[in-house]
Image (spheres, helix red, strand yellow):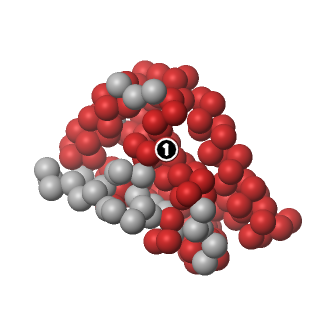
């Protein structure tokens, strides 16, 4: 059983890397970049909801930003469809799974810091309007961003509070 799990995890990682490298070549549009950043933020907060017992905060986040999350999710689907054709859904699922796995690894390796940081993120999100979600997600510290390098904003904000 362990071998099958390891094999599956390896396959997901390879698929995600393949998807990421294919996307890196074409992610030049601002809306593409925003879609990746919003999805990375959403996934990180979802992991925090489970790891840090922040379910109420995550549920509030989803309710408040539902329309923006849906719009950016559709943009990712369109991009993956363009790049992967009939295999788009599988590639997108692999990418999102890889995002969740990396967020989970960050939460495991530094749980207290991870939870403190994500709880600060939830607090910051409370003061935003839904239209500000994309720009907020693109200002996250580079260590928190799991997107192809060409989808990162030109100016990277570095979190020096760690």
Up/down of 39 relative to 16, above or below: above
Left or right? Give the position of 151 relative to 119: right
10 Å neighbourhood of mark 1: few (<14), some, or many (≥20)? many
Local SS, label 1: helix
Up/down of 67 relative to 112, above or below: above
Q: Which residue is mark 1?
A: 134
Left or right? Give the position of 12 relative to 111: right
Up/down of 136 relative to 130, above or below: below
The spot of residue 76 in percent (x, y) is 66, 54
The spot of residue 108 in percent (x, y) is 32, 52
At 50% from the left and 71% from the top, the residue drawn is 150
Write down the quadrant of residue 14 in the picture. bottom right
Up/down of 69 relative to 100, above or below: above
Write down the quadrant of residue 50 in the picture. top left
The spot of residue 126 in percent (x, y) is 37, 24
Left or right? Give the position of 122 relative to 28: left
The spot of residue 48 in percent (x, y) is 39, 39
Image quadrant holding the N terminus, namely: bottom right
Task: Specify the farthest residue to the right.
Answer: 86
At 50% from the left and 65% from the top, the residue drawn is 151
At 26% from the left and 42% from the top, the residue drawn is 117
Can the viewer see residue 54? no
At 42% from the left and 34% from the top, the residue drawn is 49
Can the viewer see residue 22? yes
Task: Specify the farthest residue to the left.
Answer: 161
Report the front residue among 86 and 132. 132
Q: Report the number of numbered marks.
A: 1
């Amino acid at each position: 059983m362990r071998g099958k799990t390891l094999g599956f995890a390896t396959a997901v990682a390879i698929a995600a890397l393949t998807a990421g490298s294919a996307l890196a070549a074409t992610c030049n549009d601002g809306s593409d970049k925003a879609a990746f950043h919003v999805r990375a933020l959403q996934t990180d907060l979802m992991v925090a909801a489970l790891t840090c017992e922040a379910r109420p905060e995550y549920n509030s986040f989803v309710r408040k930003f539902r329309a923006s999350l849906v719009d950016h999710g559709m943009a990712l689907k369109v991009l993956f469809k363009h790049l992967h054709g009939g295999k788009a859904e599988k590639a997108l699922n692999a990418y999102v799974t890889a995002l969740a796995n990396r967020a989970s690894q960050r939460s495991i390796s530094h749980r207290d810091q991870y939870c403190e940081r994500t709880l600060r993120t939830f607090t910051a999100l409370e003061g935003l309007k839904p239209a500000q979600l994309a720009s907020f997600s693109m200002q996250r510290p580079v260590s928190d961003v799991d997107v192809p390098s060409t989808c990162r904003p030109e100016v990277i904000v570095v979190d020096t509070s760690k």
